Image (cartoon, coloured by chain):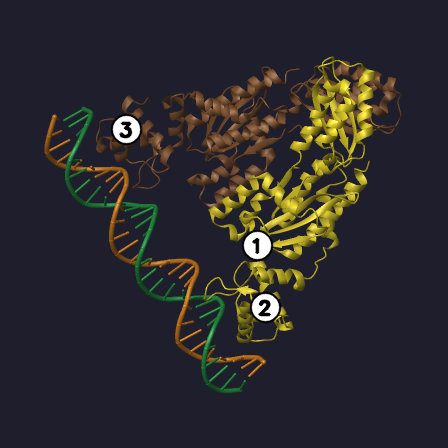
Chain colours: A brown, B yellow, C green, D orange
Amino acid sequence: MELNERKKRILHAVVANHIKTADPVGSRTVARSYRIGLSSATIRNEMADLEEMGYLKQPHTSAGRIPSQKGYRYYVDHLMSANRLTDEERLSISRSLGLDKMREIEQIIANAVKVLSSVTNQTSLIMGPQFKKSTFQQMRILPLDEKRGLVVLITDSGFIKNKVIELNQSLSPAELHQVVSYLNQKLYGLTIDQVTTSLINELKRDLFRRLEILEQAFILLEESLREEQQARVFLGGTTNILNQPEFKSVEKVHQMLSLFEQESLLFEILEKNLSEEGIVVKIGTENEHEDIQECTLITATYKINQRILGTVGVIGPTRMDYQWVIAVLRCLVDQLNRTLSSDLQT
Amino acid sequence: MELNERKKRILHAVVANHIKTADPVGSRTVARSYRIGLSSATIRNEMADLEEMGYLKQPHTSAGRIPSQKGYRYYVDHLMSANRLTDEERLSISRSLGLDKMREIEQIIANAVKVLSSVTNQTSLIMGPQFKKSTFQQMRILPLDEKRGLVVLITDSGFIKNKVIELNQSLSPAELHQVVSYLNQKLYGLTIDQVTTSLINELKRDLFRRLEILEQAFILLEESLREEQQARVFLGGTTNILNQPEFKSVEKVHQMLSLFEQESLLFEILEKNLSEEGIVVKIGTENEHEDIQECTLITATYKINQRILGTVGVIGPTRMDYQWVIAVLRCLVDQLNRTLSSDLQT
DNA sequence: AGTTAGCACTCAGCATCTAAGAGTGCTAAG
DNA sequence: CTTAGCACTCTTAGATGCTGAGTGCTAACT
């Protein structure tokens, strides 16, 4: 089953050429452009072999060959050289990320996705940091007037959530302070999804006398738990797919764009790759979701202080410049990780 | 220049029919479907007149007529009956808005745009409430630890902004409190865009001794001023334009979608209509921005406590179901206004 | 054995053509 | 003023033919 050297070179040539031109590539093109030193007839025979083995396919009887999904997979796994970016390229990415100027994590994320899509010329998507995976750091209640207060919830990784609540029962500042410090003590260091309803109930029991204010204060926690269970997905360069010749028909565009509008679906797709570290390439039907089985999805995870926060990726037709996209993605994630870990450290 | 009754009816028939079918409508269709009691020949003559007067046009020599921009304008201004929604329709919109369950203004806005696009089957857009038009209500500084504090800025209309700042100089709680109450006193009731740099500088002079902490605290104000000058624009149903036959070519789709990606441009477009109360219909070249001169934009403003907060609108091809869209938009804005004013009142 | 040249064959893409159908404008009669 | 009738125009869809790119096969060559 292993390909000999010559077949590898021919497969490589076909894939590379097709990625560049989007056209089926014929034996003559391979013979001419890549110095293999063989005639087109020989290459024709080899290509016929490769087709039989499933690495190439013909869109119609008398056209050149295009890589099959298996062909792309082999290319990614064995043929493609790891393209390191030049220093200028890295610098340019770094500059447009503008990480030095940003403070808020959402801002950084939203900007990263823009950069990624414009550099790769594909659609890119990034899962915002998962709130429920952040750890509780502290909670404060800030009285606004007699009847209302502001609950502020702070986690590591730069999340601050707040909510105006109504204080049905007026507590003295001292009492309020007592409640809050009790909560802080109990919750410190837990991740948000460890703050289960049962834990909340337990705390409620302990503090039964201040139940009413607790009720209100915990609405924030519970709502956060519910709403933010699905972190936001940021999209960039959705219109880039329109530049790809494989999306010249309006129906296909429609299909993709409708998918892009369903944030929850995108989230599911990205979440699948949350566990694996490093870069993951899913080609065609390797993707579970039906609507993207004609696409390739390349993802990587980004971290803060060694903890995986979310997934960032690029989606496009299976004919994609794998080398370039992977190199860019790697560079971007590197920089993200570094900045997030140093800057937002608490 | 005034159209006689018969011409009006014919124009009405042509516009209504074309809105429904997207095809050019011929004299025979008008004669048949609408009980005008005239033969197609007579109607042909009248249509020729209407064309000469600029209300209709022919896409090519031997096709039916389609309304010109002027024709649509006349339809909207004089022919269209104000379509009141049925109670079920109003209820259905109300339910899907789910205003009773929402708390945060951004959430309400983001949901409203979804509802609007799905009900009208067009792309809809809504300008988030303009932060700079909200009035300052109070500011607090919440010490987190020795070196850091959380600045919280609260306006009416439900805005809460916050930011972690570093306190270079440790102030005693009492001093901090003093600074903060001074600021609150000075700023209360001002809109954010009245908090100009010169005012800030003035305050700085007054408080020169606490300059350093002020410096940090005001970063929040200044950044808010800058960043949020452009409120967010929320989009819904961007792919709906793909259902419209006028967007069957990929280039046009590309043009529109690229426009949709430029938030700042959308903002400008919406901002133009911020001053006018009620529903504004801009047809074709009545829009200033070039890229939407083949479209119609219908907008309305929404308010909180009598103050205009932002603009919500629907965009689509000039062939649009004006009656329906206007009715829906009116209903939606009504409900928004009512909920915002009662719920978020402070 | 493996490689290569040559040749017949296939097929998408493009342009050209035709027929059908829809709709108009004009004219003359009601 | 209205209408029937007719010639004319123009789009659309389907059919036809041509061209170029590319293949598969065979036979000759190394």
Between the C-alphas of marks 2 and 3, the distance is 67 Å
> Depth-wise, is mark 1 or mark 2 nearer the camera?
1
User: Mark 2 belongs to which amino acid?
Assistant: Ser
Q: Is residue A324 left or right of residue B187?
A: left
Q: Is residue A93 left or right of residue C13?
A: right
* Residue A275 in sight from this viewpoint: no
Between the C-alphas of marks 1 and 3, the distance is 54 Å
Pointer 2 and pointer 3 on the same chain: no
Residue B14 against residue A62 in the figure, above or below: below
* Residue A35 screen position, x and y as percent: 25, 27
User: Mark 1 belongs to which amino acid?
Assistant: Thr
- Whichever of callouts 1 and 2 sits on the residue coming sooner in the sequence is 2
Camera-nearest residue between A52 and B136: B136
- Residue drawn at x 55%, y 76% is B42
Between the C-alphas of marks 1 and 2, the distance is 31 Å
What's the mark number on residue A37? none
User: Mark 3 belongs to which amino acid?
Assistant: Tyr
- Contact check, label 1 and label 2, Cβ < 8 Å: no
Residue where numbered disc 1 is placed: B285
